[in-house]
Image (cartoon, grey):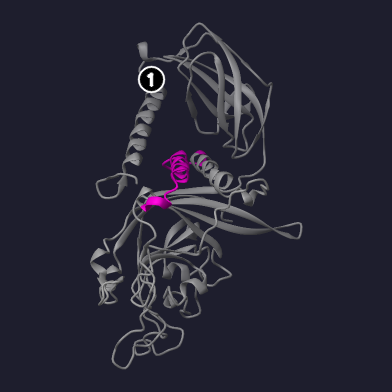
Amino acid sequence: MTKKIGKYKPIKTFIMKKSLVILSVAALAFVGCNKNGGNDKIKPLDATLEFKDASVELVYGEPTTIEATAVTEATLDRIVLKAVKKSGETYEAIGEEQAYEQKGLEISAEFFADSKEMTDVELTLVAGQQSKAFYLPAKVMGELKGTAWINDAVTLYADNKVAHNLNDNVTYPVENTGAGSDTKSFFSMHGVKIGDKVEHILSLNELLAVDGLNASMCWLNCLEKTDAQPKADGSMTYIGSQRGYMFSGCRNASLGGGTTGRQCDIANYSGHQIMDEKIDYDFSFAVVNGSWIGEKYDEAKYKLVDRIWLSAGESAETNLEKIKTFWALKKIQEELDNSKLGVEENPTSLGGKTYLRRWAEAGHTSKKPLVEGFRAGDYIIIRSERKEEVSGEKISKYYYGIVQVLQLPDDSATFVENEDKSKKYIDQEKAYDLFMKPSYFAVKTQCEILK
């Protein structure tokens, strides 16, 4: 399990961020050193460079290995690649710097095409305070296959029952009316445009405004049926076999299921509701537990997901960062779900469900043993299947992401035992304490480019 620092930050994230800060400072020192004059000024490097190829064809958003041989008496310490656009005899930078350490004179570096307008790849040799740039003609083809989103501080809340005519006809006597909710309990893998910004963490009210567009999953506390009026004695209709925190896909059948209990979320609110034809319908989860799970622990799989998580970077704000994150997360499909790529010999299949419970069989009527589903430090792989029409045929395109569970509310005080002490379960009255508590996650995911 990933060790935590402070409130909920993984220690490896802290180390990576610290390393990135050091690299950023070094980069700024390199860029700014020619402003001070004297010994800090960048000097021309006496060098020549021969590219392996006279020109290259690049695919937008994908990496290509640039190979070359340098000739210089100086000791190279790094190279910097950048997309540039030639105009006459000058070159304008239109891409972001992609820097690598360099030892020796043989160069082999991965370059991501991060601009469709580029005409050349600029490769700068750097030796201490000396540098020299060389240019490789390039042609860029294709379109981006998607984008990416990263957030290491996602906070979700299990929402209270939302008052509606379905469950409170005294307060809301008119059919299809209700209170709505501003609680951030929903996640959208592809995002929802709100104003000029794409949001991924959403409330019921925000989803109702777009009839559930791109809603992927809901974080909730399974407790009761939320489309039933209170009984004459004031008691509620509790769910019997399942209880406690869970993720649910946003299909009407999932949210409104008898062991989920969010019928109030899929109700009609003055003509708006979460609709199956609008949501991220083919969305699923696959949990990857840490070593706490014991005999079921798949060390190789966990470490693979951990490597993909780290390779996906810590930010997806710039175009290049989004491209690199999207590319890194492709490994999920290539390594864990390549049956979707048409691999026939020893294919891998991620599987997945439309719900994922913190505890299974945690209700008072369940006769099965209590089972823990996930805890802090675990990873959850998310997958979305989107269908697009090509030449009259519907083709599936898959998007992948990883959720890291950082910190969950302590639910230990909600458990009780039955009379013969043969079964532990979450008490229905104590379960009310689980609503509206913050739960913390980190997310790195591919996304469809919104039109």
- Give the x, y percent position of residue 372: 36, 61
Tell me if mark 1 has few (under 14), some (14-19) or many (20+) residues whose alpha carbon lies within 10 angstroms of its own.
some
Tell which residue pokes out farthest to the bottom in this image: 232
- Give the x, y percent position of residue 212: 50, 68
User: Which is more toward the observer, 26 or 103?
Assistant: 103
User: Which is more toward the observer, 61 or 287?
Assistant: 287
Please determine whether, in this image, residue 175 is positioned above or below residue 339: below
User: Which is more toward the observer, 57 or 249?
Assistant: 249
Determine if residue 289 is in view: no
Q: Which residues are magenta?
A: 293-320
**Pointer 1 residue:** 33
Residue 60 occupies quadrant = top right
- Give the x, y percent position of residue 268: 48, 79
- Give the x, y percent position of residue 84: 58, 29
Please name the amino acid that badge 1 sits on.
Cys
Q: Is residue 435 left or right of residue 126?
A: left
Q: Any magenta on residue 319?
A: yes
Residue sitting at x 59%, y 37%: 115
